[in-house]
């Protein structure tokens, strides 16, 4: 159903004051968030790289909190927030790797970015099918998180902001995947085995506690067949750069 700008703004203002409403708004616009990731992501054979979905979710949640009526249409405001966060992410990555970011402006074109010059060749039918599959998978993922008392906004707030912290979370996931009994216990109980994960991964317990909801989400994604969600988290198993596996 197409919503008017007034309806969207009303939802945003409700979400600013109500975490449950914020979670519902994030869930409602996951297709929009994912599309913004796909617009900004460097094209690869494996799909959108890095953990852009988590970054975009955090940016969307921050857009909810920071939005005011005088700032124009909310979705345009949120799109800019997501794009800016992803651009910052790509620039940090390019500085670490020495590679050119597709989001860096082209010198000969002024403000046009390299990414803007890449044609979009995605098949529309395939994109619609993927969007529907993503919607169903995200809805089920949200239900399982909710059973643990975790919302999408909780995950966004808990998402690591620094590469060092993200690398620590990656080590936790790697240890959990190498020890399936820990994942099985997590799925059965809905509680992170913090002591074992901290000891086995060498990650500080305080770090794990600060990012508990994010860790729960990524462990859940790797234990219940969430192929599309795992695709957005596949850097956890790649073994490239600091902190990846």
Image (spheres, rainbow, N blue to C red):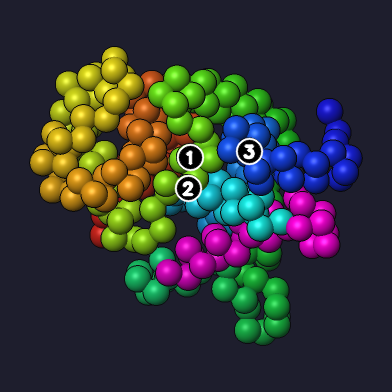
**Boundaries of the magenta span:** 68-92
Find disc 3 in the rendering and name its residue.
18
Tell me how many marks there are. Answer: 3
Residues tagged 2 and 1 counted as in contact (Cβ below 8 A): yes
Seen from the viewer's position, the closer of residues 192 and 226 is: 192
Q: Is residue 92 left or right of residue 74?
A: left
Question: N-terminal of the two: label 3 or label 2?
Answer: 3
Question: N-terminal of the two: label 3 or label 1?
Answer: 3
Q: Nearer the viewer, mark 3 or mark 1?
A: 3
Residue 74 drawn in magenta: yes
Residue 48 in view here: no
Query: Residue at the location (73% across, 44% down)?
Result: 12
Query: Residue at the location (16% across, 28% down)?
Result: 179
Q: Secondary structure at mark 3?
A: loop
Find disc 1 in the rendering and name its residue.
154
Find disc 2 in the rendering and name its residue.
157
Residue 182 drawn in magenta: no
Query: Which of the 4 quarters of the picture holds residue 217?
Result: top left
Q: In the rendering, at what x and y percent does residue 226 appear?
A: 44, 26
């Amino acid at each position: 159903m197409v919503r008017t700008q007034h309806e969207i703004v009303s939802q945003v203002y409700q979400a600013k004051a109500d975490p449950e409403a914020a979670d519902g708004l994030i869930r409602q616009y996951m297709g929009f968030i994912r599309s913004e990731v796909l617009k900004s992501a460097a094209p690869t054979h494996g799909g959108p790289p890095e953990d852009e979905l988590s970054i975009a979710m955090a940016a969307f949640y921050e857009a909810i909190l920071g939005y005011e009526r005088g700032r124009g249409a909310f979705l345009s405001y949120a799109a800019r927030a997501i794009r800016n966060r992803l651009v910052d992410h790509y620039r940090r990555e390019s500085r670490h790797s020495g590679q050119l970011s597709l989001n860096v402006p082209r010198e000969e074109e002024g403000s046009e970015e390299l990414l803007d010059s890449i044609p979009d060749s995605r098949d529309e039918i395939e994109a619609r099918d993927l969007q529907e599959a993503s919607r169903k998978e995200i809805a089920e993922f949200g239900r399982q998180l909710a059973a643990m008392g975790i919302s999408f906004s909780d995950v966004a707030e808990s998402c690591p902001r620094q590469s060092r912290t993200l690398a620590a979370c990656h080590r936790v996931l790697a240890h959990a995947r190498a020890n399936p009994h820990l994942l099985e216990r997590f799925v059965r109980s809905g509680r992170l085995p913090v002591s074992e994960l901290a000891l086995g991964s060498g990650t500080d317990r305080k770090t794990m506690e600060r990012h508990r909801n994010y860790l729960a989400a990524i462990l859940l994604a790797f234990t219940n067949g969430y192929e599309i969600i795992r695709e957005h988290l596949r850097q956890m198993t790649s073994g490239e750069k600091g902190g990846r596996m």
